[in-house]
Image (cartoon, helix red, strand yellow):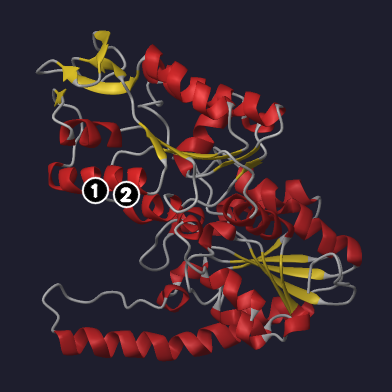
Amino acid sequence: MTIDQFNFAGKKAFVRVDFNVPLDENFNITDDNRMRAALPTLKKILADGGSIIIGSHLGRPKGPADKFSLKHILNHLSELLGVEVQFANDCMGEEAAVKAAALQPGEVLLLENLRFYAEEEGKPRGLAEDATDEEKAAAKKAVKESQKEFTKKLASYADCYVNDAFGTAHRAHASTALIAKYFDKDNKMFGYLMEKEVKAVDKVLNDIKRPFTAIMGGSKVSSKIEIIENLLNKVDNLIIAGGMTYTFTKAMGGKIGISICEDDKLDLALDLMKKAKEKGVNMVLAVDAKIADAFSNDANTKFCPVDEIPDGWEGLDIGPKTEEIFADVIKNSKTILWNGPTGVFEFENFTHGSRAVGEAIVEATKNGAFSLVGGGDSVACVNKFGLASGVSYVSTGGGALLEAIEGKVLPGIAAINE
Protein backbone atom coordinates (compact mmCIF):
# COMPACT_ATOMS: atom_id res chain seq x y z
CA MET A 1 0.00 0.00 0.00
CA THR A 2 1.31 3.48 -0.84
CA ILE A 3 0.36 6.62 1.05
CA ASP A 4 -1.19 8.10 -2.10
CA GLN A 5 -3.48 5.07 -2.51
CA PHE A 6 -4.65 5.20 1.11
CA ASN A 7 -7.63 7.27 2.27
CA PHE A 8 -7.16 8.33 5.90
CA ALA A 9 -10.72 9.68 6.30
CA GLY A 10 -11.96 8.73 9.77
CA LYS A 11 -8.76 6.78 10.51
CA LYS A 12 -6.24 7.24 13.28
CA ALA A 13 -2.69 6.96 11.93
CA PHE A 14 0.36 6.20 14.07
CA VAL A 15 3.14 8.05 12.26
CA ARG A 16 6.75 7.35 13.22
CA VAL A 17 8.78 10.43 12.36
CA ASP A 18 12.37 11.43 13.03
CA PHE A 19 12.07 14.64 15.05
CA ASN A 20 15.50 14.16 16.61
CA VAL A 21 16.30 17.83 16.07
CA PRO A 22 19.15 19.84 17.64
CA LEU A 23 18.19 22.12 20.54
CA ASP A 24 20.25 24.91 22.10
CA GLU A 25 20.68 25.42 25.87
CA ASN A 26 17.32 27.23 25.99
CA PHE A 27 15.57 24.37 24.14
CA ASN A 28 15.17 26.38 20.93
CA ILE A 29 15.31 24.29 17.76
CA THR A 30 18.45 25.23 15.80
CA ASP A 31 17.60 23.21 12.66
CA ASP A 32 14.03 22.11 11.89
CA ASN A 33 14.73 20.38 8.56
CA ARG A 34 13.70 16.97 9.89
CA MET A 35 10.35 18.37 11.03
CA ARG A 36 9.71 20.11 7.73
CA ALA A 37 10.62 16.91 5.86
CA ALA A 38 7.67 15.09 7.50
CA LEU A 39 5.08 17.80 6.74
CA PRO A 40 3.85 16.41 3.37
CA THR A 41 2.97 13.08 5.04
CA LEU A 42 1.29 14.67 8.05
CA LYS A 43 -0.67 17.17 5.94
CA LYS A 44 -1.90 14.45 3.55
CA ILE A 45 -3.41 12.55 6.50
CA LEU A 46 -5.09 15.67 7.87
CA ALA A 47 -6.36 16.72 4.43
CA ASP A 48 -7.97 13.29 4.00
CA GLY A 49 -9.85 13.76 7.28
CA GLY A 50 -7.67 11.51 9.41
CA SER A 51 -6.11 12.09 12.83
CA ILE A 52 -2.48 11.53 13.80
CA ILE A 53 -0.57 10.03 16.70
CA ILE A 54 3.06 11.09 16.27
CA GLY A 55 5.88 8.99 17.72
CA SER A 56 9.54 10.03 17.74
CA HIS A 57 12.73 9.90 19.76
CA LEU A 58 14.97 12.79 20.77
CA GLY A 59 18.59 12.19 21.71
CA ARG A 60 19.78 9.14 23.60
CA PRO A 61 18.14 9.28 27.02
CA LYS A 62 18.69 6.57 29.60
CA GLY A 63 15.20 7.19 30.99
CA PRO A 64 12.88 10.21 31.37
CA ALA A 65 14.85 13.49 31.27
CA ASP A 66 13.54 17.02 30.74
CA LYS A 67 16.27 17.96 28.27
CA PHE A 68 15.13 15.13 25.96
CA SER A 69 11.41 15.90 26.25
CA LEU A 70 9.50 16.35 23.00
CA LYS A 71 7.40 19.05 24.71
CA HIS A 72 10.20 21.43 23.65
CA ILE A 73 9.20 21.03 19.98
CA LEU A 74 5.42 21.14 20.56
CA ASN A 75 4.82 24.82 19.79
CA HIS A 76 6.94 24.80 16.65
CA LEU A 77 5.21 21.64 15.41
CA SER A 78 1.82 23.30 15.95
CA GLU A 79 3.02 26.32 13.92
CA LEU A 80 4.30 24.14 11.08
CA LEU A 81 1.08 22.12 10.88
CA GLY A 82 -1.33 25.00 11.49
CA VAL A 83 -3.06 22.82 14.10
CA GLU A 84 -2.76 22.95 17.88
CA VAL A 85 -0.95 19.71 18.59
CA GLN A 86 -1.91 17.90 21.80
CA PHE A 87 0.75 16.27 23.98
CA ALA A 88 0.86 13.07 26.03
CA ASN A 89 3.41 13.30 28.86
CA ASP A 90 4.05 9.55 28.80
CA CYS A 91 3.78 7.50 25.61
CA MET A 92 2.61 4.50 27.67
CA GLY A 93 0.44 6.23 30.27
CA GLU A 94 -3.32 6.23 30.63
CA GLU A 95 -3.32 9.82 29.36
CA ALA A 96 -1.86 8.73 26.01
CA ALA A 97 -4.49 6.02 25.54
CA VAL A 98 -7.36 8.36 26.51
CA LYS A 99 -6.16 11.21 24.28
CA ALA A 100 -5.55 8.85 21.33
CA ALA A 101 -9.02 7.34 21.70
CA ALA A 102 -10.64 10.80 21.81
CA LEU A 103 -8.87 12.15 18.71
CA GLN A 104 -11.23 13.65 16.13
CA PRO A 105 -10.52 13.99 12.40
CA GLY A 106 -7.97 16.75 11.83
CA GLU A 107 -6.48 16.48 15.34
CA VAL A 108 -2.89 15.61 16.20
CA LEU A 109 -1.34 14.04 19.32
CA LEU A 110 2.40 14.06 19.96
CA LEU A 111 3.62 11.30 22.29
CA GLU A 112 6.46 11.90 24.71
CA ASN A 113 9.92 10.61 23.70
CA LEU A 114 9.62 6.88 22.92
CA ARG A 115 13.18 6.27 24.10
CA PHE A 116 12.25 7.19 27.67
CA TYR A 117 11.39 3.47 27.70
CA ALA A 118 14.14 0.87 27.29
CA GLU A 119 11.57 -1.22 25.40
CA GLU A 120 11.73 1.13 22.39
CA GLU A 121 15.31 0.06 21.63
CA GLY A 122 14.97 -3.34 23.26
CA LYS A 123 18.17 -2.94 25.25
CA PRO A 124 18.45 -3.33 29.03
CA ARG A 125 19.48 -0.29 31.08
CA GLY A 126 21.00 0.23 34.49
CA LEU A 127 23.13 -2.91 34.52
CA ALA A 128 26.06 -2.81 36.91
CA GLU A 129 29.45 -2.66 35.20
CA ASP A 130 30.45 -5.91 36.85
CA ALA A 131 27.22 -7.71 35.84
CA THR A 132 27.75 -11.36 34.98
CA ASP A 133 26.90 -12.84 31.59
CA GLU A 134 23.91 -14.56 33.21
CA GLU A 135 22.64 -11.24 34.60
CA LYS A 136 23.08 -9.56 31.23
CA ALA A 137 21.22 -12.36 29.47
CA ALA A 138 18.37 -12.25 32.01
CA ALA A 139 18.06 -8.46 31.66
CA LYS A 140 18.04 -8.73 27.87
CA LYS A 141 15.36 -11.41 27.98
CA ALA A 142 13.22 -9.33 30.36
CA VAL A 143 13.33 -6.20 28.19
CA LYS A 144 12.57 -8.22 25.04
CA GLU A 145 9.49 -9.70 26.71
CA SER A 146 8.23 -6.33 27.94
CA GLN A 147 9.00 -4.88 24.49
CA LYS A 148 6.13 -6.94 23.05
CA GLU A 149 3.63 -5.29 25.41
CA PHE A 150 5.13 -1.87 24.74
CA THR A 151 4.82 -2.34 20.96
CA LYS A 152 1.30 -3.75 21.23
CA LYS A 153 0.19 -0.73 23.29
CA LEU A 154 1.58 1.75 20.74
CA ALA A 155 -0.17 -0.13 17.94
CA SER A 156 -3.47 -0.11 19.85
CA TYR A 157 -3.72 3.68 19.55
CA ALA A 158 -4.23 3.59 15.78
CA ASP A 159 -5.98 2.02 12.79
CA CYS A 160 -3.00 2.26 10.46
CA TYR A 161 0.77 2.75 10.59
CA VAL A 162 2.99 5.09 8.59
CA ASN A 163 6.78 4.99 8.82
CA ASP A 164 8.32 8.28 7.71
CA ALA A 165 11.54 8.02 9.75
CA PHE A 166 14.27 6.95 7.33
CA GLY A 167 16.90 8.15 9.80
CA THR A 168 16.00 5.23 12.10
CA ALA A 169 15.10 2.66 9.41
CA HIS A 170 18.28 0.69 10.16
CA ARG A 171 17.13 0.08 13.74
CA ALA A 172 14.82 -2.82 14.60
CA HIS A 173 13.14 -0.75 17.30
CA ALA A 174 9.59 -1.12 18.59
CA SER A 175 8.18 1.90 16.74
CA THR A 176 10.24 1.54 13.55
CA ALA A 177 9.91 -2.15 12.73
CA LEU A 178 8.15 -4.31 15.34
CA ILE A 179 4.93 -2.25 15.41
CA ALA A 180 4.32 -2.91 11.70
CA LYS A 181 3.52 -6.56 12.52
CA TYR A 182 0.28 -5.40 14.20
CA PHE A 183 -1.07 -3.97 10.93
CA ASP A 184 -1.95 -5.88 7.79
CA LYS A 185 -0.42 -5.05 4.42
CA ASP A 186 -3.28 -2.71 3.49
CA ASN A 187 -2.87 -0.63 6.66
CA LYS A 188 0.88 -0.01 6.82
CA MET A 189 2.94 2.12 4.46
CA PHE A 190 5.88 4.45 3.98
CA GLY A 191 5.38 8.19 4.35
CA TYR A 192 6.42 10.45 1.48
CA LEU A 193 9.90 11.05 2.92
CA MET A 194 10.59 7.33 3.33
CA GLU A 195 9.29 6.66 -0.18
CA LYS A 196 11.68 9.24 -1.62
CA GLU A 197 14.62 7.91 0.40
CA VAL A 198 13.99 4.31 -0.65
CA LYS A 199 13.68 5.32 -4.32
CA ALA A 200 16.85 7.46 -4.19
CA VAL A 201 18.94 4.67 -2.66
CA ASP A 202 17.49 2.16 -5.13
CA LYS A 203 18.37 4.45 -8.05
CA VAL A 204 21.98 4.82 -6.89
CA LEU A 205 22.46 1.11 -6.27
CA ASN A 206 20.24 -0.57 -8.87
CA ASP A 207 19.45 1.89 -11.66
CA ILE A 208 22.96 3.04 -12.41
CA LYS A 209 23.77 5.36 -15.30
CA ARG A 210 27.49 5.23 -15.96
CA PRO A 211 30.06 6.43 -15.17
CA PHE A 212 29.15 5.98 -11.48
CA THR A 213 31.34 7.91 -9.02
CA ALA A 214 31.27 7.64 -5.23
CA ILE A 215 33.04 10.22 -3.08
CA MET A 216 33.79 8.77 0.34
CA GLY A 217 35.10 11.11 3.03
CA GLY A 218 35.30 10.73 6.77
CA SER A 219 38.19 10.33 9.16
CA LYS A 220 38.34 6.55 9.48
CA VAL A 221 38.73 3.78 6.92
CA SER A 222 37.50 1.32 9.58
CA SER A 223 34.03 2.91 9.70
CA LYS A 224 33.68 2.74 5.91
CA ILE A 225 35.20 -0.68 5.08
CA GLU A 226 31.94 -2.48 4.28
CA ILE A 227 30.60 0.46 2.27
CA ILE A 228 33.80 0.75 0.24
CA GLU A 229 33.89 -3.00 -0.39
CA ASN A 230 30.25 -3.00 -1.56
CA LEU A 231 30.84 0.06 -3.75
CA LEU A 232 33.84 -1.57 -5.43
CA ASN A 233 31.34 -3.97 -7.02
CA LYS A 234 29.28 -1.09 -8.41
CA VAL A 235 31.25 2.08 -9.12
CA ASP A 236 33.53 3.13 -11.96
CA ASN A 237 35.34 5.75 -9.85
CA LEU A 238 35.91 5.81 -6.10
CA ILE A 239 37.22 9.09 -4.73
CA ILE A 240 38.82 8.78 -1.29
CA ALA A 241 38.71 12.04 0.68
CA GLY A 242 38.81 13.40 4.23
CA GLY A 243 40.96 11.95 6.98
CA MET A 244 41.04 8.53 5.30
CA THR A 245 43.39 10.07 2.73
CA TYR A 246 46.32 9.94 5.14
CA THR A 247 45.92 6.28 6.02
CA PHE A 248 46.11 5.44 2.30
CA THR A 249 49.03 7.86 1.80
CA LYS A 250 51.05 6.40 4.67
CA ALA A 251 50.27 2.87 3.48
CA MET A 252 51.99 3.77 0.20
CA GLY A 253 55.05 5.02 2.04
CA GLY A 254 54.22 8.73 2.11
CA LYS A 255 55.15 11.22 4.84
CA ILE A 256 51.99 12.58 6.52
CA GLY A 257 53.34 14.57 9.48
CA ILE A 258 50.84 14.48 12.35
CA SER A 259 47.80 13.97 10.09
CA ILE A 260 45.04 11.69 11.32
CA CYS A 261 45.89 8.08 10.48
CA GLU A 262 44.82 4.57 11.46
CA ASP A 263 48.18 2.84 11.73
CA ASP A 264 46.50 -0.54 12.23
CA LYS A 265 44.63 -0.17 8.93
CA LEU A 266 47.57 0.36 6.55
CA ASP A 267 47.37 -3.20 5.20
CA LEU A 268 43.63 -2.81 4.77
CA ALA A 269 44.14 0.35 2.71
CA LEU A 270 46.59 -1.46 0.42
CA ASP A 271 44.17 -4.38 0.16
CA LEU A 272 41.32 -2.06 -0.87
CA MET A 273 43.55 -0.49 -3.53
CA LYS A 274 44.42 -3.95 -4.83
CA LYS A 275 40.73 -4.95 -4.95
CA ALA A 276 39.87 -1.75 -6.82
CA LYS A 277 42.55 -2.52 -9.41
CA GLU A 278 41.33 -6.11 -9.81
CA LYS A 279 37.76 -4.92 -10.34
CA GLY A 280 38.76 -2.19 -12.79
CA VAL A 281 37.66 0.60 -10.46
CA ASN A 282 39.50 3.90 -10.75
CA MET A 283 40.40 4.73 -7.14
CA VAL A 284 41.15 8.46 -7.00
CA LEU A 285 43.37 9.71 -4.19
CA ALA A 286 44.55 13.20 -3.26
CA VAL A 287 47.89 14.40 -4.66
CA ASP A 288 48.23 17.57 -2.59
CA ALA A 289 46.89 18.88 0.72
CA LYS A 290 46.22 22.11 2.55
CA ILE A 291 48.21 21.62 5.71
CA ALA A 292 48.26 23.41 9.06
CA ASP A 293 50.63 23.58 12.02
CA ALA A 294 47.71 23.13 14.47
CA PHE A 295 44.15 21.81 14.43
CA SER A 296 42.65 25.28 14.34
CA ASN A 297 41.01 27.67 11.90
CA ASP A 298 43.68 30.24 12.79
CA ALA A 299 46.68 27.94 12.26
CA ASN A 300 49.44 28.74 9.78
CA THR A 301 48.70 27.02 6.46
CA LYS A 302 50.37 26.08 3.20
CA PHE A 303 49.99 23.60 0.35
CA CYS A 304 52.25 20.63 -0.26
CA PRO A 305 52.26 17.19 -1.92
CA VAL A 306 50.08 14.86 0.15
CA ASP A 307 52.99 12.45 0.71
CA GLU A 308 55.49 15.14 1.77
CA ILE A 309 53.82 16.68 4.82
CA PRO A 310 56.51 18.00 7.21
CA ASP A 311 56.79 16.90 10.83
CA GLY A 312 54.46 18.86 13.12
CA TRP A 313 52.02 19.67 10.28
CA GLU A 314 48.75 17.96 9.41
CA GLY A 315 46.50 17.79 6.37
CA LEU A 316 43.13 19.48 6.99
CA ASP A 317 41.84 19.70 3.40
CA ILE A 318 42.72 18.79 -0.17
CA GLY A 319 44.88 21.09 -2.26
CA PRO A 320 44.11 22.84 -5.59
CA LYS A 321 45.54 20.10 -7.84
CA THR A 322 43.38 17.50 -6.10
CA GLU A 323 40.34 19.76 -6.39
CA GLU A 324 40.85 19.80 -10.17
CA ILE A 325 41.32 16.03 -10.38
CA PHE A 326 38.23 15.29 -8.24
CA ALA A 327 36.09 17.87 -10.09
CA ASP A 328 37.09 16.48 -13.48
CA VAL A 329 36.05 12.94 -12.49
CA ILE A 330 32.77 14.17 -10.97
CA LYS A 331 31.77 16.35 -13.94
CA ASN A 332 32.15 13.37 -16.28
CA SER A 333 29.87 11.16 -14.14
CA LYS A 334 26.19 10.24 -14.61
CA THR A 335 25.53 8.77 -11.13
CA ILE A 336 27.13 10.36 -8.07
CA LEU A 337 27.08 9.44 -4.39
CA TRP A 338 28.70 11.82 -1.88
CA ASN A 339 29.28 10.76 1.71
CA GLY A 340 31.79 12.74 3.70
CA PRO A 341 33.59 16.08 3.20
CA THR A 342 37.15 16.48 1.90
CA GLY A 343 38.42 18.26 4.99
CA VAL A 344 37.59 19.97 8.26
CA PHE A 345 34.77 22.02 6.69
CA GLU A 346 33.68 23.27 10.13
CA PHE A 347 36.73 25.57 9.97
CA GLU A 348 36.15 28.30 7.38
CA ASN A 349 39.77 28.12 6.16
CA PHE A 350 39.37 24.44 5.26
CA THR A 351 36.06 24.51 3.36
CA HIS A 352 37.48 25.06 -0.11
CA GLY A 353 37.87 21.41 -1.12
CA SER A 354 34.40 20.36 0.03
CA ARG A 355 32.87 23.37 -1.72
CA ALA A 356 34.72 22.49 -4.95
CA VAL A 357 33.38 18.92 -4.79
CA GLY A 358 29.86 20.21 -4.10
CA GLU A 359 30.01 22.66 -7.00
CA ALA A 360 31.27 19.94 -9.36
CA ILE A 361 28.35 17.71 -8.30
CA VAL A 362 25.89 20.55 -8.98
CA GLU A 363 27.41 21.06 -12.44
CA ALA A 364 27.21 17.33 -13.24
CA THR A 365 23.59 17.29 -12.03
CA LYS A 366 22.75 20.18 -14.38
CA ASN A 367 24.17 18.05 -17.19
CA GLY A 368 21.85 15.14 -16.40
CA ALA A 369 23.61 13.17 -13.65
CA PHE A 370 21.66 11.73 -10.70
CA SER A 371 23.34 12.86 -7.47
CA LEU A 372 22.66 11.62 -3.95
CA VAL A 373 24.22 13.38 -0.95
CA GLY A 374 23.98 11.64 2.40
CA GLY A 375 25.54 11.46 5.83
CA GLY A 376 25.38 14.27 8.38
CA ASP A 377 28.58 16.09 7.39
CA SER A 378 27.93 16.01 3.63
CA VAL A 379 24.39 17.27 4.17
CA ALA A 380 25.73 20.02 6.44
CA CYS A 381 28.22 20.88 3.67
CA VAL A 382 25.66 21.32 0.89
CA ASN A 383 23.40 23.30 3.23
CA LYS A 384 26.28 25.51 4.42
CA PHE A 385 27.32 26.26 0.84
CA GLY A 386 23.75 26.75 -0.42
CA LEU A 387 24.09 23.86 -2.89
CA ALA A 388 21.30 21.54 -1.66
CA SER A 389 18.82 22.63 -4.35
CA GLY A 390 21.39 21.85 -7.06
CA VAL A 391 21.71 18.11 -6.33
CA SER A 392 19.14 15.43 -7.13
CA TYR A 393 18.52 14.25 -3.59
CA VAL A 394 19.74 15.06 -0.07
CA SER A 395 19.18 12.12 2.26
CA THR A 396 17.98 12.64 5.83
CA GLY A 397 19.43 9.31 6.94
CA GLY A 398 23.02 9.01 8.15
CA GLY A 399 23.49 5.49 9.47
CA ALA A 400 20.44 4.24 7.59
CA LEU A 401 21.79 5.45 4.25
CA LEU A 402 25.23 3.97 4.90
CA GLU A 403 23.78 0.56 5.81
CA ALA A 404 21.59 0.63 2.70
CA ILE A 405 24.68 1.39 0.60
CA GLU A 406 26.47 -1.51 2.29
CA GLY A 407 23.71 -3.66 0.80
CA LYS A 408 22.01 -4.43 4.13
CA VAL A 409 18.24 -4.89 4.41
CA LEU A 410 16.93 -2.16 6.72
CA PRO A 411 14.45 -3.47 9.35
CA GLY A 412 12.20 -0.38 9.07
CA ILE A 413 11.83 -0.95 5.33
CA ALA A 414 11.50 -4.72 5.50
CA ALA A 415 8.68 -4.41 8.10
CA ILE A 416 6.52 -2.44 5.66
CA ASN A 417 7.30 -4.67 2.69
CA GLU A 418 6.50 -7.94 4.54
Q: Residue at x 59, y 47 (%)?
A: 395
Q: 75 and 210: which one is in front?
A: 210
Q: Is residue 82 above or below residue 114?
A: above
Residue 386 pos. (x, y %): 61, 24
For label 2, the residue is 275
Q: Position of residue 221 (x, y in %)?
A: 28, 45
> Foreground residue, 324 or 382?
324
Q: Quadrant of residue 84?
A: bottom right
* Snapshot quadrant of residue 30: top right
Q: CA distance from mark 2 to mark 1?
A: 6 Å
The circle drawn on residue 203 is: none
Three-letter amino acid code at the position of disc 1: Asp
Determine the secondary structure under disc 2: helix
Left or right? Give the position of 72 relative to 350: right
Callout 2 crowding tier (Cα within 10 Å): few <14, some 14–19, many ≥20:
some
Image coordinates for residue 402, horizontal then vertical, percent: 46, 54
Residue found at x 48% / y 50%: 398
Q: Mark 1 and mark 2 in contact (Cβ < 8 Å)?
A: yes
Q: Is residue 16 left or right of residue 379?
A: right
329 is higher (above) or lower (below) than 181: above
Query: Which residue sits at x=78%, y=53%?
Result: 40
Asked if residue 240 shows in the view, the reply is: no
**Of the residues shown, which amino acid type is indicated by label 2?**
Lys
Q: Which mark is residue 271?
A: 1
Q: Nearer the viewer, residue 70 or 238?
A: 238
